[in-house]
Image: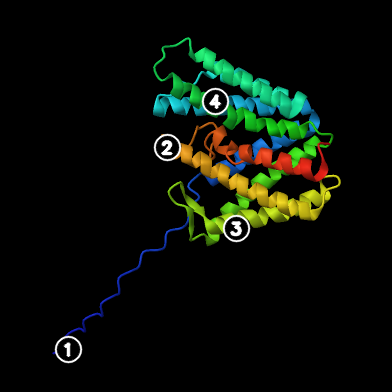
Amino acid sequence: MPPPPLASAPQPPQQPAPAKKSAGRNLQAAIGVGVGLGVVIVASLFIVKAVFVGVVAVAVLVGVWELTSRLAERKGIRVPLIPLAVGGVAMVVAGYLRGADGAWVAMALTCLAILVWRMTEPPHDYLKDVTAGVFATFYVPFLATFVVMMLAADDGPRRVLVFLLLTVISDTGAYAVGWRFGSHKLAPRISPGKTREGLLGAIAFAMVAGALLMQYVIDDGHWWQGLLLGLAAALSATLGDLGESMIKRDLDIKDMGTLLPGHGGIMDRLDSLLPTAPVVWLLLVAFVGKG
């Protein structure tokens, strides 16, 4: 009689495959849109300065529309859009033609127009609406005026190019290092995806890029100035990203809009650019003058 078959040894339970890290967005679409925007911006920047001023004005218009639309949808805040939009464009033009003084005057007049325009409606929530309007005026068009003030210099296109590259390279460094090595959360209650390692990557990438750009792109610039410029740009870009994340968490939304596939809305691309503009403008003026 044949011996009974041996019982097969129990197989160890299979461990689930580790989940791959994901960027959370359509990466191909994001890259395609980013390259397309970069081509448009660089082309307008080096062809005619006035064309780039128009590009900034359009970005401001779309940005304030996205911001005020989300405020109305999620919080019931009715920011007067017409005076904000008209004043925003006026601020950009005034900043280019008259510098900081023109931008400040245009901002003051825009805030005044918002206060008066809102008076044509019932007084309920007046203070809330005009406060949000003043905030939106500062956050989008006023900060954007520093971009066109950089452009107004003799070497303006190169200054704006340095500003854009530093911000993009900072964001890229944060993403690349954070995705690969990130394990310590930077601000988990505001933006769970951001890590301390990503911040260090942003700083390192931006400082190297800043040193090269100041040495070889900006007249009379020096590499050590670029190190400081890159450090400041990385910090301001990170704070700007966190600031918009705070707004979106308060509004309980993921993106400010859907205009740009893989990116969200215009405001989702301006979040790190807007607060970095005055920082780069100020440091370039300190290092090499107004031009």
- Give the residue type that dot 4 points to: Val
Closer to the chain start, of discs 4 and 1, is 1
Q: Position of residue 289 (x, y in %)?
A: 82, 40
Q: CA distance from mark 1 to mark 3?
A: 67 Å
Q: Residue at x 75, y 28 (%)?
A: 99
In the picture of the structure, the residue carrying the numbered disc 1 is 3
The answer to whether residue 260 shows anywhere in this view is no
Q: CA distance from mark 2 to mark 1?
A: 72 Å
- Give the residue type that dot 2 points to: Asp
**Residue 200 image label:** 3
Pointer 1 and pointer 3: residues touching (CB < 8 Å)?
A: no
- Callout 3: SS: helix
Q: Quadrant of the N terminus?
A: bottom left
- Give the residue type that dot 3 points to: Leu
Does 24 sit above or below residue 5? above
Q: Seen in the image, is 99 located left or right of residue 185?
A: right
Pointer 2 and pointer 3: residues touching (CB < 8 Å)?
A: no
In the picture of the structure, the residue carrying the numbered disc 2 is 250
Q: CA distance from mark 2 to mark 3?
A: 27 Å
In front: label 2 or label 1: 2
In front: label 2 or label 4: 4
Pointer 2 and pointer 4: residues touching (CB < 8 Å)?
A: no
In the picture of the structure, the residue carrying the numbered disc 4 is 134
Q: CA distance from mark 2 to mark 4?
A: 18 Å
